[in-house]
Image: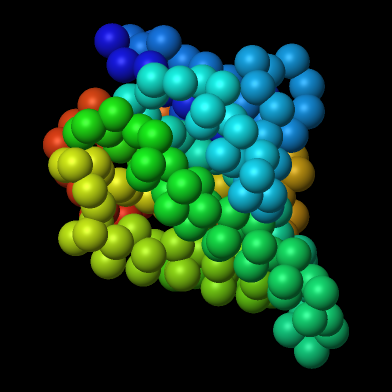
Amino acid sequence: MKTVILIGALGKMGQAALSGLGNHKVITAGRSGDVDHIVDITDVNSIEALYKKVGHFDAVVNTVGFCEYAPFAEMTEEQWRTTVMSKMMGQINLVRIGQKYIADAGSFTLISGILNVKPIPYAIADATASGAIDTFVKCVAYEMPRNTRINVINPTVLAEAWDVYGEMMPGFEPVPGKLVGKAFERSVDGFITGEVIFVDA
């Protein structure tokens, strides 16, 4: 049994990840709600405080990253910055800071999303940040210390979230959260590293 920090545990993607972590002790974290620890991934001090409070842990699974949606011609610098600081730098900082605290041979699992390979209108910031995280994971795997692994889950839209996102994604086939949970399980319990794990219909 591993001790896994699950960030964004209360969201639909967090619940999908949780379905694949049943063999482990899961410590939940998020910006609000009924979680074990409060954390804001856009704040480096909040990230460091989380790791110090938890103490020993074998894996970090992140399922959050806020993105702004708007046509490219209308996107402001502030909207770009919000997306980059959350979905991109927030996740990079989880790893950058976490590498000092995670157990030997531990693992990080990040989240990107299918829109960087199957673009839709209004999602340029999300697609760009997701592409950056996919690249980050593939490259940083060569530099991770103490046999630490890192992977990223790149899922299409969840069936459980289709009522929210379906109208934006015509022609996409949603996947059940349980299938996405299997991808998180593979990342945490397997031996792969530097992989972009696509979950698509």
Can you say whether 198 is above or below 130 in the image?
above
Residue at left 15%, top 36%? Answer: 191
Q: Nearer the viewer, residue 16 or 138?
A: 138
In the rendered image, residue 33, in percent from the top left (x then y), is placed at 78, 22
Residue at left 58%, top 30%? Answer: 50
Q: Nearer the viewer, residue 196 or 121?
A: 196
Can you say whether 35 is above or below 51 in the image?
above
Residue at left 79%, top 71%? Answer: 79
> How has the structure been colored for display?
rainbow
Residue at left 43%, top 53%? Answer: 96
Which of the 4 quarters of the picture holds residue 135? bottom left
In the rendered image, residue 145, in percent from the top left (x then y), is placed at 22, 48
Circle count: 0
Apparent side of residue 195 relative to residue 89 in the rendered image (left or right): left
Q: Nearer the viewer, residue 74 or 38?
A: 38
Apparent side of residue 143 relative to residue 17 in the rendered image (left or right): left
In the rendered image, residue 199, in percent from the top left (x then y), is placed at 38, 46
Can you say whether 159 is above or below 154 in the image?
above
Residue 178, visible in the rendered structure: no
In the rendered image, residue 163, in percent from the top left (x then y), is placed at 74, 40
Q: Nearer the viewer, residue 192 or 98?
A: 98
Residue 49, visible in the rendered structure: yes
Classify the position of the N terminus by image quarter.
top left
Apparent side of residue 32 relative to residue 27 in the rendered image (left or right): right
